[in-house]
Amino acid sequence: MRFFAWAAAVGGMALACGAWAQGAASYPVKPIRIIVPYTAGGSADFMARMIGQKLTEAWKEQVLVENRGGAGGNLGFEVAAKAPNDGYTLVVVNNSQAINESLYTHLPFELKKDFAPLMMLASSPMLLAVHPRVPANNAVEFTELVKSQPGKLSYGSCGVGTPMHLAGELYKFLTHTYIVHVPYRGCSPATLDAIGGQVDAVFATTATALPHVRAGKLKAIALTTSKRTPAAPEIPTFRESGVPALKDYEVDNWYGLMAPAGTPKDIIAKLEGEIRKIVSAPEAKQRMAAVGIDPALSTPDELMRQLVADIDKFGKVIKFAGIKGD
C-alpha cells in the first residue's frame, strides 16, 4: 500500500510538471495586459503601445495597454502588485519609481519584494538648457555663473519628484550651488517658460527641449546621461564637461518592464526574448529616435541593479533637498 501511495504521489507530481511545462511552452493563451502607471502620450505610454502592437502581431494574442496614472505612478503599481503572477500582467517601470521609494513613506507595495524585473527597454535623455540671455555656453561657464550668484538664477522642472527635478537637485548637491527650483505640470510648460525668460534654465527631456535648441530659442548646456545621445551627438554630457564635481554625474530617464513577483521564470524569459527582438528591430529604432528615445536593453538582473542604485542615489538627493511627497 505504501508503494502504491508513493507511486501515485510521484505520478501526480510528474503529471503536474508536464502540464506546467506544456503551459509555459504554449504561453500566451489569453490577452496580456501592460499597465502604464502614467497618463497617455508620454514616453512610457509610447514604448508600451509599440511593444504591445508587435507582441500582438507575433503571438496572435491581444496585448492591451492600460493607463493607470496617479500618485506619481504609485496607483498603477498598486494595481499591478495585486494582479495574478501568471505572466498576463506587466507594468512599465522607470526611475520615477526609484524616486518614489524615498519620496513617499507609506507605499502600498514593496518594489523590490512585490515585483520581478523583466528588462530595461529604453532611455529618454534629459538636458539642461538655458535662455539665450544667460551668459553661459557650457557646464563650466554655467557652474561658475551660478556660484557667483547664489539664489539669483532659477530652473524649471517637469514637476516635483520627477527625474528632471532630481537631475537639478543632484547638480546642486554635487557642485554645492544654489539655484531656485520652479516646478511645472509637465516638461512642455517648463520649457516654454524657459523660452519666455520666466525661468533662466530648464531640465527637460531632449524630446521636449531639443527642437527649441535647434531653433535657437534655448542654449543646450549638457546632457544628464552618462553617454551622448544619437539624437544630438554634438551636446556633451555633464560627465565630460570639465567640471570636476560632475565627473560621476548621471541621471537617466529610463524605462523598463516588471511583472508581479513569482511570475514563472520561463515566461519572463520568453517575454524578454521576444521584446528584445522588437526593440532591436530597425523599424522600432526609427520610431523611437523620432520621439527622442534611445534603445537601452538589459537583462532582468541588470534592471534590478539599476533600480537599486537609483533608489540609493535619489534617496540621498531627496534628503539633501528636503523634498516631500506625502
Image (cartoon, rainbow, N blue to C red):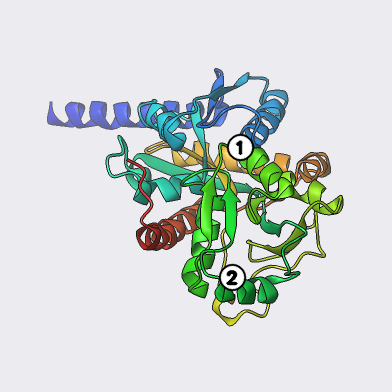
Where is residue 324? Give x, y as percent: 35, 47
Quadrant holding the C terminus? top left
Where is residue 261? Give x, y as percent: 38, 38
Please tell me which residue lies in front, 80 or 232: 232
> Are dots 2 and 1 in contact, CB under 8 Å?
no
Residue 203 seen in the current view: yes
Q: Residue furthest right?
A: 215
Q: What type is the residue that disc 1 sits on?
A: Ala
Q: Which residue is mark 2?
A: 146
Please tell me which residue lies in front, 185 or 38: 185
Residue ID at (67%, 80%): 242
Quadrant holding the N terminus? top left
- Work out whether 261 lies above or below 209: above
For label 2, count other residues whose C-alpha is less than 10 Å away and answer few (under 14), some (14-19) or many (20+): many
Q: What type is the residue that disc 2 sits on?
A: Val
Where is residue 118? Give x, y as percent: 52, 44
For label 1, count other residues whose C-alpha is less than 10 Å away and answer few (under 14), some (14-19) or many (20+): many
Under tag 2, what secondary structure? helix
Under tag 1, what secondary structure? helix
* Disc nearest the viewer among 2 and 1: 2
Q: Which residue is mark 1?
A: 44
Q: Work out whether mark 2 precedes mark 1 in sequence or the reverse, and give the earlier one.
A: 1
Residue 252 seen in the current view: no
